[in-house]
């Protein structure tokens, strides 16, 4: 048997797949949970790929709830893609950490709010923004992740253009 020692910093800076593997190994070694078969995205078949316009509509519905907006944009980060059809996976614990919410229950409430907003935008009660697996992951369609990232980038560019325009209008013309 060979052992390996990793510092907290090394684990924190490891790629997401490596961190997930370490987490699963530690949980299994400590007997905290029985080993589970590889997660199958059972809910993936019901996920709706969303366009940038869909995501803008969802944002409009949830814009008064900052935690839900934070969770939405958190899903614009690159995730881990797997399965057929492919889905993007995000650890609920990572979402919790990045959004600074208090517990996973709050993350779940925000995700449900986003799901509800999508059903209203699509006018389809069966449309699902995200699903979940049995290992604590949120699943979304790859197109949805790309649309969220594009929406975020568009918003940042508009903000920068507005700031540049405002700064330009403050500059007095030279005499």
Image (spheres, helix red, strand yellow):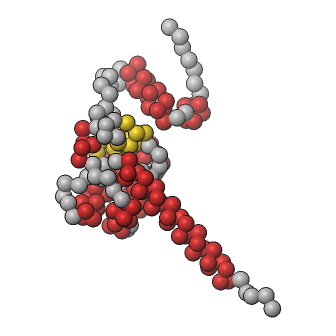
Q: Quadrant of residue 160?
A: bottom right
Q: Residue furthest bottom?
A: 175
Image side of residue 79 versus residue 54, left or right: right
Which of 129 and 116 lies nearest the eye of the viewer? 129
Q: Quadrant of residue 45?
A: top left
Q: Residue furthest left?
A: 125
Residue 88 position within the rendered picture, expressed as x and y whole percent measured from the top left? 38, 43
Q: Is residue 47 above or below residue 14?
A: below
Q: Is residue 104 above or below residue 160?
A: above
> Residue, x 53% and y 10% (percent of image)?
2
Q: Residue furthest top?
A: 1
Image side of residue 97 versus residue 50, left or right: right
Residue 86 position within the rendered picture, expressed as x and y whole percent measured from the top left? 34, 40
Which of 29 and 39 lies nearest the eye of the viewer? 39
Residue 164 position within the rendered picture, expressed as x and y whole percent measured from the top left? 63, 74
> Residue, x 31% and y 37% (percent of image)?
84
* Residue 20 in sight in this render: yes
Q: Residue furthest front?
A: 84
Q: Is residue 109 above or below residue 122?
A: above
Quadrant (top left, top right, bottom left, bottom right) of the C terminus: bottom right
* Residue 92 in sight in this render: no
Which of 76 and 150 lies nearest the eye of the viewer? 150
* Marker count (numbered): 0
> Residue, x 38% and y 21% (percent of image)?
28
> Residue, x 32% and y 22% (percent of image)?
35
Q: Quadrant of residue 174?
A: bottom right
Residue 137 position within the rendered picture, expressed as x and y whole percent measured from the top left? 35, 40
């Amino acid at each position: 048997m060979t052992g390996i020692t990793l510092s907290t910093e090394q684990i924190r800076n490891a790629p997401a797949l490596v961190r997930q593997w370490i987490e699963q190994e530690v949980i299994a070694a400590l007997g905290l949970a029985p080993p589970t078969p590889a997660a199958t995205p059972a809910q993936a078949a019901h996920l709706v790929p969303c366009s940038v316009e869909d995501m803008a509509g969802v944002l409009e519905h949830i814009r008064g709830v900052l935690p839900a907006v934070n969770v939405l944009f958190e899903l614009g980060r690159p995730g881990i893609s797997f399965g057929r059809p492919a889905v993007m996976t995000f650890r609920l614990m990572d979402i919790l950490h990045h959004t600074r919410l208090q517990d996973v229950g709050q993350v779940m409430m925000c995700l449900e709010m986003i799901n509800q907003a999508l059903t209203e935008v699509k006018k389809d009660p069966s449309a699902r923004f995200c699903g979940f697996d049995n290992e604590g992951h949120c699943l979304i369609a790859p197109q949805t992740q790309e649309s969220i990232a594009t929406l975020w980038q568009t918003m940042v560019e508009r903000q920068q253009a507005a700031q540049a325009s405002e700064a330009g209008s403050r500059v007095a013309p030279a005499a």
